[in-house]
Amino acid sequence: MAKKSKGNIANKIFTVILLAGLAAGAWYVYTAPQFERVAPKIESPKHIFWNRKEPLKVKVSDNVALNSYEVALSDGTKKVIIDQGFFDNGPKEGTITVKYPKGKVLNPKAKDYTLMVTVGDKSMWNMMAGNTATKTIDVTVDYKRPNVNILSNSRMINQGGSALVVFQADDDNMDKLYVKANKNMFKPQPYKKEGYYAVLVAWPFVDDSFDAKIVATDMAGNRREVHIPFYHGNPRYKTSYIRATDKFIDGKITDLASSDPEYATITDKLEKLKAINETMRLKNEALIHKLSKHVSDEMLDAWKIKKFYPLRNGKKVASFGDHRYYYYGSKDNIVSESYHVGYDLASNSMADIKASNPGKVVFADDNGIYGNMPLIDHGLGLYTLYGHCSQLFVQEGDEVHAGQTIAKTGMTGLAMGDHLHFGILVQGIEVRPVEWFDQSWINKFINNVFKQADLIISPPPVKEKKKK
């Protein structure tokens, strides 16, 4: 009996050890990274467009390591595996490149396909087979480029100036539509009817050359570019050398520096001048550029603008586009430089500033070197700026009408005397105010362009000849 009892105890101990080992093994399998149970991810919209010329890119990922992939394509009748393989070195992220199969395996006239992507990882889960993920993607084939036609445009643009383009563009799957002028992109606004657009463009005065084109791309990656024909004008811009006196630095420059913690601790005169005239200036202008980029998506039925005349009897104090060099002591000791991106006008102290055209105030507050500054949106990406004001009579969000007094001239900001710094921007780019001061220029290069386009978009009815 003693031997049997000892045998039972040994069996029980063995069983306990076995169960413990099995439990430990199960726990290891359940928790070990090699047996993780998270399936890979396939990143793609449910429906995509494809031009069949460019390969599709499908991004995949796994929390530990990718292993294999398979891609199949079906035209609704036939299904073929067009690619399969393994990921080198088990990455966590990868891209599967899908090319349309050569030959006539699938119906070349088919417009709708189904793409099936299967991805496996390196996990030892599922009897060493790992985790898999499969995604079915609907594919619409589109190899037709967008249609773009210019209706009318300003025949000339000046360096630093503005121009108008009215055009037609359509595509069943349009993705992006813009005008690229040099490195800048200008957003067109819908005009008159669906498929028609108007856009103001600008030639930055610091760029020596200019080229503009309409760019249209669709969801399948098809692209069309249409060059806009402009004659170029190259007005000369002034270079000025300004003496930076101690009075100027200890006065206006120090006053502006002390108002901003970013510059208040600068004690060196020349560092302070450079910080305000360059760093603060660029910061203030960045805000202006940001606020003046917006263009409405609403359909524009008409856009009328009259010449700007913000200050009655205003005399020119400084021109647009001046390149200013500041020197300290001797003229060869250049300590700072900047560009003057507005047109300065002066008349009486604290003179009335009027809005020449209706618009919406998008900013009315202090803006560093520009002092108290209203900024008005006149539509189609055209904005006007009024700097150094002593008083403001409008606030952000106000709708202003033509002839309304919006502020009074002053010498806030970096102004040595009472005057108005008047600026005009097209989608965040400063342009020549003198063009917009001139009604004949507006008629020739803006109004007439609209009139010419309108005759194409909405031609007048043909009068029937009376029968004799």
Image (cartoon, helix red, strand yellow):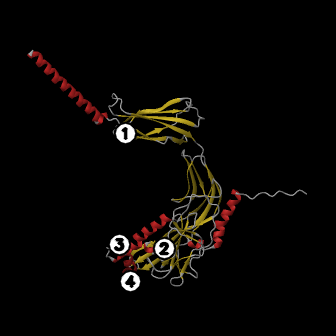
Which residue is under mark 1?
Answer: 62
Q: Element type at marker 4?
A: helix
Amino acid at circle 4: Lys
Sort mark 2 into few (<14), some (14-19) or many (20+) by Cα contacts within 10 Å: many
Q: Looking at the picture, how far across and down is residue 418, in whole percent?
A: 48, 82
Q: Looking at the picture, how far across and down is residue 167, in whole percent?
A: 63, 56
Which residue is under mark 3?
Answer: 263
N-terminal of the pair, mark 3 or mark 2, is 3
Q: Quadrant of the N terminus?
A: top left
Q: Element type at marker 2?
A: strand
Sort mark 3 into few (<14), some (14-19) or many (20+) by Cα contacts within 10 Å: some
Q: What residue is drawn where x is 12% and y is 16%? A: 4
Amino acid at circle 2: Met
Q: Quadrant of the C terminus?
A: bottom right
Label 4 and label 1: CA atoms lie apart by 66 Å
Label 3 and label 2: CA atoms lie apart by 21 Å
Which residue is under mark 4?
Answer: 247
